[in-house]
């Protein structure tokens, strides 16, 4: 965890950006991302220098060229370690007029990061602000993966305004729940076709590091982890930059994060490629048939983005692959032909494992839409016997726009450091949901439908027209209440009225 002191430094830099005229939080993060990338280039160059010095050989891979440019200025001046100690005005000139143009020429080296830097723009408005940001970033222990990862997550949490195209951040604890439920392994190929800031991919990577600590000691698996395990697509270049830097700061060297309009492009060459999909796709409305992939239209004829994304997940998953995805409630009970057909496919042709109903305020302040997590396995041959339902009524945070934590930090999330007391379950259901998920083929089958979780046989779901809304199957027990007779109540009212009149008479007598 990052310290309160570090958080307050970031807050001060944020305020400086704001007063300097950059009020868009995405632009603030983008500028900090560029600077982090410049710092990383210098760190890599230093590593290569040290290696060359140790071996007594020339450098194999120079990031900053030798010598001087056409104006006779040293390329070495572009390095973070050189310009960070320059006077603010000189630093501002070097970064704005030389470092950023240099960044834009790096695209040819093939790495994910340099590819997303090709249209880098320097928009920090004055030398004083640049000097403050460089100073702040210089004080962060960048060799500590946890610190720099948490730092970036903290900055991302400050994006408090919804983006365009229905983009908004998925809360960290919801991501953690979905990752814990799907339990990624070191051999998985993980994809998020609407990756945004790459929160799902980052959390999956952290989970693999935590639960399979020896996996990265194997050369083949280490190469897979850094280069071919994580795949993220988005059509917002700012998000791609931020997402790829988020992965880098969490220790993934070269993830496959690239530009793609997931619903518009045909995915024939990617079909059945991934073993795990984690996603919270945008459900911002509908697209024209003309601008939608014909591949997806063959799966389900619809213009609705939430249904098209579900069809896309089914195309991208390889047989045996699993998915945990967030969908709006309408997907669970929508009555259109496309809604029903997609639900039928999930139940009849694939294996629908579970539906986790999230509380209404889960995505505030960005959106008040009610959502659920769908968990399914692609089989192409059915396999749904029972569908496990769980109703989350509290996720550890208040369900208003402020989203303040209801418990101490070590009791939040699906896998808290400290076990929750019985009365604390009412404030954070996630650990209970996770524990019950892993028992869904055992004792969960015996639970009554009046409880917080229960299983529904496939036959019941078919009978209800493949409706997957929890309320369709949950049984509510109404307590019988005995009401008094109206005459008794009237008699009580008459007695009270008489007491009031008597009290008023006594008061008048005292005042007379």
Image (spheres, grey):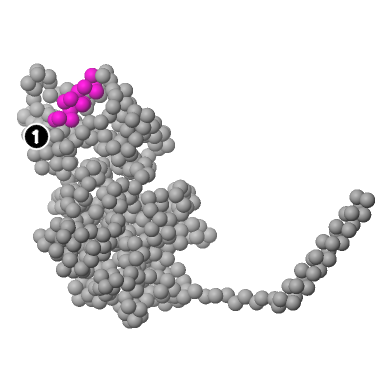
How many tags in the picture?
A: 1
**93 is within the stretch colored magenta:** yes
Work out whether 463 lies above or below 419. below
Q: Is residue 297 left or right of residue 131?
A: left
Q: Nearer the viewer, residue 439 or 39?
A: 39
Q: Nearer the viewer, residue 153 or 422?
A: 153
Quarter assignment of residue 312 = bottom left
**Magenta span dominant secondary structure:** helix
Q: Secondary structure at mark 1?
A: loop
Q: State the residue position of label 1.
A: 61
Q: Is residue 247 left or right of residue 62?
A: right
Q: Report whether residue 112 is seen.
A: yes
Residue range highlighted in magenta: 90-102
Q: Nearer the viewer, residue 426 or 374?
A: 374
Residue at position x 11%, y 62% in the image:
268
Q: Report whether residue 217 is seen.
A: no
Q: Position of residue 260 (x, y in %)?
A: 17, 52
Q: Position of residue 27 (x, y in %)?
A: 28, 37
Quadrant assignment for the N terminus: top left
Residue at position x 60%, y 77% in the image:
480
Q: Position of residue 429 (x, y in %)?
A: 44, 60
Q: Is residue 425 left or right of residue 201?
A: right
Q: Position of residue 132 (x, y in %)?
A: 32, 26
């Amino acid at each position: 965890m990052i310290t309160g002191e570090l958080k307050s430094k970031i807050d001060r830099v944020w305020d400086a950006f704001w007063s300097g005229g950059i009020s868009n939080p995405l632009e603030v993060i983008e500028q900090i991302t560029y600077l982090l990338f410049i710092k990383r280039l210098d760190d890599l160059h230093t590593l290569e220098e040290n290696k060359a010095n140790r071996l007594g050989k020339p450098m194999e891979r120079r990031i900053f060229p030798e010598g001087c440019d056409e104006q006779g200025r040293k390329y070495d001046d572009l390095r973070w370690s050189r310009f960070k100690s320059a006077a603010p005005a000189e630093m501002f000139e070097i970064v704005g007029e030389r470092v950023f143009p240099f960044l834009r020429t790096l695209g040819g080296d093939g790495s994910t990061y340099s590819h997303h830097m090709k249209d880098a723009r320097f928009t920090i408005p004055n030398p004083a602000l640049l000097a403050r940001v460089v100073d702040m970033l210089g004080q962060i222990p960048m060799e500590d993966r946890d610190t720099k990862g948490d730092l970036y997550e903290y900055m991302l949490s400050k994006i408090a305004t919804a983006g365009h195209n229905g983009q908004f951040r998925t809360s960290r604890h919801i991501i953690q729940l979905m990752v814990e439920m799907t339990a990624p392994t070191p051999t998985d190929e993980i994809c998020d076709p609407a990756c945004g800031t790459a929160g799902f991919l980052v959390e999956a990577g952290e989970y693999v590091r935590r639960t399979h600590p020896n996996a990265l000691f194997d050369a083949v698996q280490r190469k897979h982890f850094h280069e071919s395990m994580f795949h993220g697509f988005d059509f917002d270049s700012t998000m791609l930059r931020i997402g790829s830097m988020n992965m880098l700061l969490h220790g993934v060297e070269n993830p496959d994060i690239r530009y793609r309009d997931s619903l518009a492009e045909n995915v024939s060459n990617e079909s059945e490629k991934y073993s795990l999909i984690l996603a919270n796709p945008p459900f911002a409305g509908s697209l024209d048939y003309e601008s939608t992939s014909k591949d997806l239209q063959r799966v389900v004829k619809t213009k609705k983005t939430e249904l098209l994304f579900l069809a896309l997940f089914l195309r991208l998953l390889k047989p045996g692959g699993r998915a945990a995805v967030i969908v709006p409630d309408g997907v669970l009970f929508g009555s259109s032909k496309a809604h029903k057909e997609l639900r039928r496919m999930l139940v009849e042709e694939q294996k629908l494992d579970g539906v986790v109903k999230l509380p209404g305020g889960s995505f505030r302040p960005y959106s008040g839409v009610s959502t659920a997590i769908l968990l399914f396995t692609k089989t192409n041959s059915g396999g749904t016997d029972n569908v496990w339902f769980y109703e989350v009524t509290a996720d550890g945070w208040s369900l208003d726009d402020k989203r303040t934590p209801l418990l101490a930090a070590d009791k939040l999330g699906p896998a808290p450091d400290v076990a929750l007391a019985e009365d604390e379950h009412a404030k954070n259901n996630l650990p209970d949901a996770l524990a019950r998920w892993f028992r869904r083929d055992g004792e969960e089958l015996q639970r009554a439908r009046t409880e917080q979780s229960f299983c529904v046989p496939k036959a019941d779901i078919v009978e209800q027209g493949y409706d997957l809304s929890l309320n369709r199957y949950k049984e509510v027990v109404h307590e019988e209440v005995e009401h008094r007779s109206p005459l008794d109540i009237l008699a009580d009212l008459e007695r009270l009225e008489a007491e009031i009149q008597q009290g008023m008479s006594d008061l008048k007598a005292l005042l007379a």
